[in-house]
Amino acid sequence: MGTPPIDHSDASSELTSTINVSTLRAVPGTRESAELLSLLTPEEISIISQLPALDAMFISLSGPGKGGRYLLDKPVFTIGRDPASEIFLDDITVSRKHCEISRNVGGQFEVRDLNSLNGTYLNAISTAKSSLRQGDEVQIGKYRLTFFQSNKFEGKGK
């Protein structure tokens, strides 16, 4: 009285899956200074090179908010859809309190996810907490922000 075996010779009984590859992209590796320079406008290069020694900046190089610049000049920044966030990203893919950027005493920045619904990604890999390096891409919802730090930028004056 068990269930009869499935006849796989009948094409109508086969299951199929569709994968949408248009949203997939390669995991970016560490970008070289020359590649970073090619992505920036002369104005952006000038702005980054003039940042005070311990400050940094996010620049949106692609996607929504392209061209957006966010100065990181305090010890802690919140990023989210809450208008009270230091970096306000107004989109449903961003949690109200999505993540936090902090700078330690030595000037090293790190990103920490605040239990956001869609997660925080560093170079296309989900992260709860990670240090930021020159050229790292932080994805928050559909926003992709590239990290630049003045004292680590080799394009000064060019």
Image (spheres, rainbow, N blue to C red):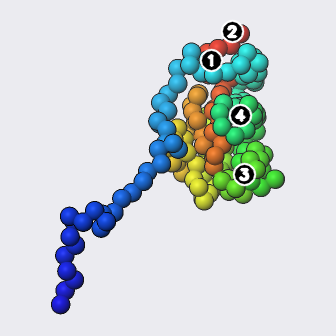
* Residue 84 vertical placement versus 21 (above, below): below
* Mark closer to the observer (3, 2): 3
Asked which quadrant contains residue 153, the reply is: top right
Q: Secondary structure at mark 2?
A: loop
Q: Residue furthest top?
A: 158
Q: Rounded to the nearest whole Å, what is the CA distance between mark 1 and mark 2?
A: 9 Å
Question: To which residue does mark 2 refer?
Answer: 158
Looking at the image, do the residues carrying marks 1 and 2 touch, with CB atoms under 8 Å apart?
A: yes
Res. 91 mark:
3
Left or right, 102 with respect to 6, comes to right
The CA span between labels 4 and 3 is 14 Å
Q: Nearer the viewer, residue 121 or 17?
A: 17
Q: Which residue is mark 1?
A: 37
**Which quadrant holds the C terminus?**
top right
For the residue marked with disc 2, what is the amino acid?
Answer: Lys
Q: Is residue 56 left or right of residue 12?
A: right
Q: Secondary structure at mark 3?
A: loop
Q: Quick one: label 1 or label 2, which is nearer the N terminus?
A: 1
> Does residue 138 lie above or below 57 as drawn?
below
The residue under label 4 is: 66
Q: CA distance from mark 4 to mark 1?
A: 16 Å
Disc 4, SS = loop
Q: Looking at the picture, how far across and down is residue 101, in whole percent?
A: 66, 43
Residue beneath the point at 36% across and 59% down: 16
Secondary element at image label 1 = helix
Badge 4: how crowded within 10 Å, few (<14), some, or many (20+)?
A: few
From the top left corner, tell me how far across and down residue 149 is, in percent.
Answer: 66, 27
Residue at 57% from the left image edge and 15% from the top image edge: 34
| Most foreground residue, 110 or 135 | 135
